[in-house]
Image: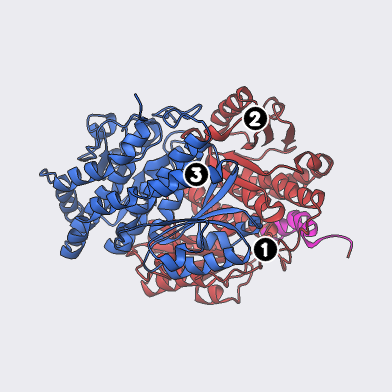
Chain colours: A red, B blue
Amino acid sequence: MSEEYLQHEIHEQPTVLQDMLDREDNAIERLADAIRERQIEHVLIAARGTSGNAGIYARYLLGMVNGLPVELAAPSMYTLYQSPPRLRNTLVLGISQSGMSPDIVAVMEDGQAQGMLTAAITNAPDSRMGQIAEHVIPLGAGEERSVAATKSYTTELLALALLSAALAQDAEMRQALQRVPEAVVNALSLEEIIGRRAERYHYMEQCAVISRGYNYATALEIALKLKELTYTSTTPYSAADFMHGPIAVVRPGYPVMVIATAGVAQPVLSELVDELVAREAELLIIGDDATLTQHASLPLRLPMPLPEWLSPIVAVVPGQLLGYHLALARGLDPDRPRGLNKVTETH
Amino acid sequence: MSEEYLQHEIHEQPTVLQDMLDREDNAIERLADAIRERQIEHVLIAARGTSGNAGIYARYLLGMVNGLPVELAAPSMYTLYQSPPRLRNTLVLGISQSGMSPDIVAVMEDGQAQGMLTAAITNAPDSRMGQIAEHVIPLGAGEERSVAATKSYTTELLALALLSAALAQDAEMRQALQRVPEAVVNALSLEEIIGRRAERYHYMEQCAVISRGYNYATALEIALKLKELTYTSTTPYSAADFMHGPIAVVRPGYPVMVIATAGVAQPVLSELVDELVAREAELLIIGDDATLTQHASLPLRLPMPLPEWLSPIVAVVPGQLLGYHLALARGLDPDRPRGLNKVTETH
């Protein structure tokens, strides 16, 4: 095989995203109906790792567009300590590629035992998680063979975006969703510059990855990809938390990636970029505004902007590509990071 | 002045903790009564940085001991986006040393506008946050002059622990609380070994800091102290999240701090230590069990164990001391980290 699974799966994303948009089955509409009928007032998300980052996206999206407070479950309360909090009018929403992580399943089982509405967003509808959930949203992303999740992440985000639009019953949102696959095709064109410039970061040992609002999830996910694929000690931050202390680590040449697409969060991220320029940081910028990305040593300008609420689906793509090409530049196997399994059986 | 503010404030902790226990004013009991009377079902915490780490402690403590689901507010929803979620039967609890951070105040103001119960845990009862809140729990920690927060953090934890005991109306919990100041005195005795061994970490550029359950908050807070005070690129993890990917970064000699005190989380953390020993990581271990700490290059055994739910108040202390002594070893000013202000005015 000449191509790694990872590169193949990164490039499959427009297709699997389009497949989800084209799906006839209306599982997401049925879940939205149930959320209304059951008078859901809270969402508790059970997820870890990459799917946990999709949960962070859900927190902003369902919170701001749909007015639903979203909390991410701390699974140890359910497994180790077996002292779950009391739930009321809550949707317990599991997000997991494999549907097999025992601690995520434990949160779902508790939700069921407490009589809550349960739903699973998963690539494995027949998994234990899929069996427990009243509502199952299949990702339909096809088998994901690389340990580092890519297409399962962007399809998880799209499923959440479709759910938000279904809850809002908003025609403009539904229209915007149709542009996602093409925007991802466009983002994939950044592979040329990323492949050419990856060597610059061969010896990078640490990196901060920063955004705010909707793309905070993107910062978390890109930091995780760079860690898994390249063993770089990357740390994600919201711009506000970063200014509250960690900015102290920035010395001249310190690498910082900023994700700043058009929207409400852009002005504050633009201020942060100015501050980082003043501190002579090495900047990697993912965004759709050339006046902002021009400050970067590695400017990654997304050719086709999306509305801010959808931008995380496309903004993560250059980060996935950087993880892949930096792994190659370092002579690492992008499909099998050392010491990782596809399904982590944490309890 | 021969002694830095920071060292002084670290050593003040037993006194200010004892002061809080001795306080006659029953603000915490009144808040517990209000939580019962107003039939509070959810807690929304507004906090950032060190106080945000106290919020993580609250999430485990109020969730597991008192059955209350706790969510940490994403302040940008309230400030930048101005699209807060709908709240019901919720306590909006601000935690802030200064009570001045505009984004935290915005979350409190929204809670008030939505008719929710509001409370503030703060060192500045006269601040804007203190003025808004129906219930104010003063830290009474005295002025904190070092930029890196220490005594305000441990008093925030104690205030939360007192609130949890008041809600539970549990005599055993109240008794255990009385042992906190002495346990902190004992933990301060670790300064001798820390001062002697800090030089070993002079050139440490990165470090993972790991725990699980109650002490996940401790991992977050120690990572923040090391970042602020020593500019080390530290990244905190829950043990479960770490196993889900980031463990890939561990090569022989890679520094990992593990916080593992006696209790429910200890066995899984002990398994993690075995795995890290197999990977030949450089281990720094904070714990109260000598068979566990013996695996460490820097064993930091707490002389006086506390019940697991109180252990975060004492387990953070060796991390504060390491931050201070490593700053000194590196010739840095522990009171004024570069580019930080005591109050960060994020919006």
Q: Is disc 3 surrounded by few (<14), some (14 to 19) or many (20+) residues within 10 Å? A: many
Q: Which residue is mark 2?
A: A281
Q: Is residue A8 magenta?
A: yes
Instruction: Say which mark, if any, is on residue A287.
Output: none
Q: Is residue A159 left or right of residue B83?
A: right
Spatial CA distance of label 2 from label 1 is 45 Å
The subunit carrying tag 2 is A
Residue type highlighted by circle 1: Arg
Residue A265 versus residue B240: which sits nearer the camera? B240
Q: Position of residue A306 (x, y in %)?
A: 65, 40
Residue B73 appears in the rendering = no
What secondary structure is found at the residue carrying circle 1? Answer: loop
Stretch in magenta: A2-20
Sequence order check: which comes first, mark 2 or mark 1?
A: 1
Q: Which residue is mark 3?
A: B198
Residue type highlighted by circle 3: Ala
Residue A161 versus residue B206: which sits nearer the camera? B206
Is there CB contact under 8 Å for labels 2 and 1? no
Res. A337 image quadrant = bottom right
The residue positioned 72% from the left and 67% from the top of the image is: A142
Q: Position of residue B165 (x, y in %)?
A: 21, 58
Discs 3/2, front: 3
Residue A144 versus residue A200: which sits nearer the camera? A200
The residue positioned 28% from the left and 49% from the top of the image is: B185
Residue type highlighted by circle 2: Ala
Quarter of the image for the N terminus of chain A: give it: bottom right
Q: Of helix, strand and loop, which mostly describes the magenta segment?
A: helix
Q: Which residue is mark 1?
A: A23
Is there CB contact under 8 Å for labels 3 and 1? no
